[in-house]
Image (spheres, rainbow, N blue to C red):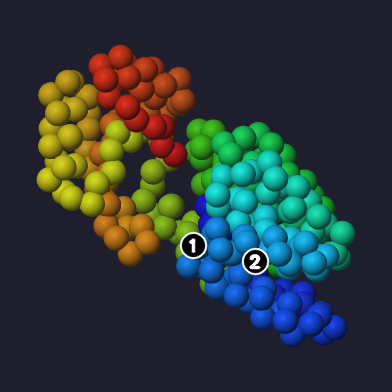
Amino acid sequence: MKVRIIAGLSLVCNVSLGFAQELSTAWEYFLKERYNISERIVNSLLEEKNASPDIYYLKALILLRTGDYEHARIYFEKLSFYGKDWSEISLIAQADAFFYQGKLSQAKNIYQTFLKRYSYSSYLPEVLYKYAQILRKEGLWEEAKTYFRKVVNNWPHSLFATFARKLLSEDEFYFCVQVGSFLNYDNAYNLTVRIKNMGYPAYIKKVEYRGELYYRVRIGKYPDRNSVQEVLAQLRKKGINGIIYP
């Protein structure tokens, strides 16, 4: 799932030029993944009582990227007091924070709340896509496909339609165990052979991420979570660590 980045969504005309410049600098460092410097600037602005949705939003994103999900949600919640657009962003961002934390049921509940409350929102393709991602992680394959198709059919030119279209074309609506991810093909191949020799159906999945090609070693295509958890438990007893995907 991607984090939404909205720089300067509601900077009002009466903010000082110095504040605007510092906030812009903080965003630049954030986008370069220099989170410590970005947060230092943001904290300085907050200490000067420069409260605004823009600064709260950036602070929350920094906390989200650095894994402090609880505090990220606190700052995302503050956005709900700044009007309709920010209220929508607040809800989505809080759900995102739960998702990244692995708390899928909480994330799902908030996305559902959004869909009921903002049924005509411009953010609908994003929320429906993310909701479908949770359904996919829950193993509700057909329901997930229905929502992905809805995004593709109703918002065909949106970014999230592109993501949904890719997932539908790959047809990875099953569970598997991922035991490794490598930039070097030989490393992936050697691990695949090792796992196959142990009697498991291992294979290599090519995935492009941030402009680089990764070779991910995966095992099986299981229809339900119980089956894949059983395989993962077996592997761990044999000294093989892995994660369940998706």
Question: How far from the left and from the top, in percent, is residue 157?
Answer: 54, 72
Q: Is residue 146 visible?
A: no
Tell me if mark 1 has few (under 14), some (14-19) or many (20+) residues whose alpha carbon lies within 10 angstroms of its own.
Answer: few
- Across and down, in percent, residue 9 comes to 72, 74
Mark positioned earlier in the residue sequence (1 or 2):
1
Q: Label 1, secondary structure: give it.
A: loop
Question: Residue 41: which disc?
Answer: 2
Question: For the residues marked 1 and 2, what is the alpha-carbon distance in whole angstroms?
Answer: 14 Å
Name the residue rendered at 61%, 44% in the picture. Answer: 68
User: Does 189 sit above or below residue 233?
Assistant: below
Between 237 and 151, which is closer to the camera in this rendering? 237
Q: Where is residue 63 in the image (x, y as percent from the top left)?
A: 62, 51
Circle 2: element type: helix
Q: Label 2 neighbourhood size at 10 Å, few (<14), some (14-19), many (20+)?
A: some
Q: In this view, does 163 lie to the left or right of 41?
A: left
Q: Mark 1 points at which residue?
A: 33
Q: To which quarter of the image does residue 196 belong?
A: top left
Residue 183 location, x and y as percent? 23, 52
Residue appearing at x 45%, y 20% in the figure? 226
* Residue at figure coordinates x 53%, y 69% from the top left: 29
Q: Where is residue 178, by image quadrant?
A: top left
From the viewer's perspective, tell me whether residue 228 is left or right of residue 123.
left
* Amino acid type, callout 1: Glu
What amino acid type should be assigned to the residue bearing mark 2?
Answer: Ile
Task: Decide if residue 196 is in sight here.
Answer: yes
Residue at the image position 18 percent from the left and 50 percent from the top: 184
Compared with 142, 12 (above or below) is: below
Q: Residue 222 carries which label?
A: none
Q: In which quarter of the image is the C terminus?
A: top left
Mark 1 vs 2: CB contact within 8 A: no
